[in-house]
Image (spheres, rainbow, N blue to C red):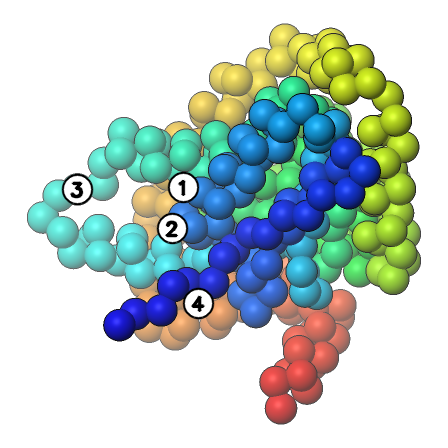
Amino acid sequence: MSSTPSPSIRTETQDRVRSIILCRPERYNAINARLRDEFSAAMDAADADDNISVVLLRADGPSFCAGYALDEYTQQQTGQRSSSRVWDSAHDLRNISTFVSAFAKLWYSSKPTIAAVQGWCIAGGTDFVFWADLIVASESASFGYPPARVWGVPTNPLWVQRLGLQRAKQYLFTGDEMPAQEAAKLGLVLEVCPDSQLQERAMQLAQRIALVPCNQLQLMKLFLNQQAENQGIGSSRLIGALFDGIARHTQEGLEFVASAQTKGFRSAVRERDAPFGDYGEGVKGKKRNRKNAKKDL
């Protein structure tokens, strides 16, 4: 008899604030279909609850979200290549759009949403968290979209709104890592605080916002978000989801998958990032790797 899988999401409620907590710390809260569905359901419940004014997204463990569970997805893509059917871009778009629609509930929820981010928040983690209205980061946080180097295009269209066009181009042309302090300086996140104070600071902000009547918050969020909607978020979201599939099926994308299958996903990622000297190959990343290795002993 098979056991029931552990939940990927849990929720807590305090003073009109609903915390939605990613709880796959052993996998760096990597995104898979189960996490997507549980998060989507939790967002729907929070939005429908008249006793909730603010949603606070948090994560267990040393990292907020290291992206998609790519070991699973590279295996899926290998299986698709061995199929008699060629890559189906329409099917791919429908599939990735289920993830985008779930994460975008942070944006389209009628209530303000805040994300508290520690450690890695990269690749699919940015696709996820950039939909939040406000982001508070700890000093250990790092952001970036390394699949910009091979095998991906962001499905979150808010890079330009958060960074401005020129800075967004800098970070997506290079896939460079962005430490928390730089992210705050450039306006990607609201503020940075010590790791030990992250959860307390984010909750304080959420509770302060929750002092305002919920209907007033809903009107204000709709008013503010409409400014960005008028700049073409919807069309950019569609193009990003489509182009992400295309990037995974370029010659270089297929070679990346083949490398991951023969050498292991971690080795393929190290080879991708080594020339840039960041993420797991940077000083900060190597310190994290050593620290995590000691925990495993």
Q: Residue at 54% of width from left, 65% of height from top?
A: 27
- Mark 2 or 3 closer to N-term? 3
- Mark 1 or 2 closer to N-term? 1
- Name the side, left or right, on which 146 lies relative to 102: right
**Residue position marked by numbered label 4 in the rendering:** 265
**Residue position marked by numbered label 3 in the rendering:** 86
Q: Residue at 75% of width from left, 37% of height from top?
A: 17
| Residue 105: percent from left, percent from top | 57, 29
Q: Quadrant of the N terminus?
A: bottom left
- Mark 3 crowd level (few <14, some 14–19, many ≥20, 10 Å Cα): few
| Residue 107: percent from left, percent from top | 63, 26
Quarter location, residue 138: bottom right
Label 1–label 2 contact, CB within 8 A: yes
Which residue is nearer to you in this view: 258 or 5?
Answer: 5
Q: Residue at 80% of width from left, 48% of height from top?
A: 137
**Residue position marked by numbered label 1 in the rendering:** 247
Label 3–label 1 contact, CB within 8 A: no
Q: Which three-letter amino acid code belongs to the residue tagged 1?
A: Ala
Quarter location, residue 296: bottom right
- Mark 4 or 2 closer to N-term? 2
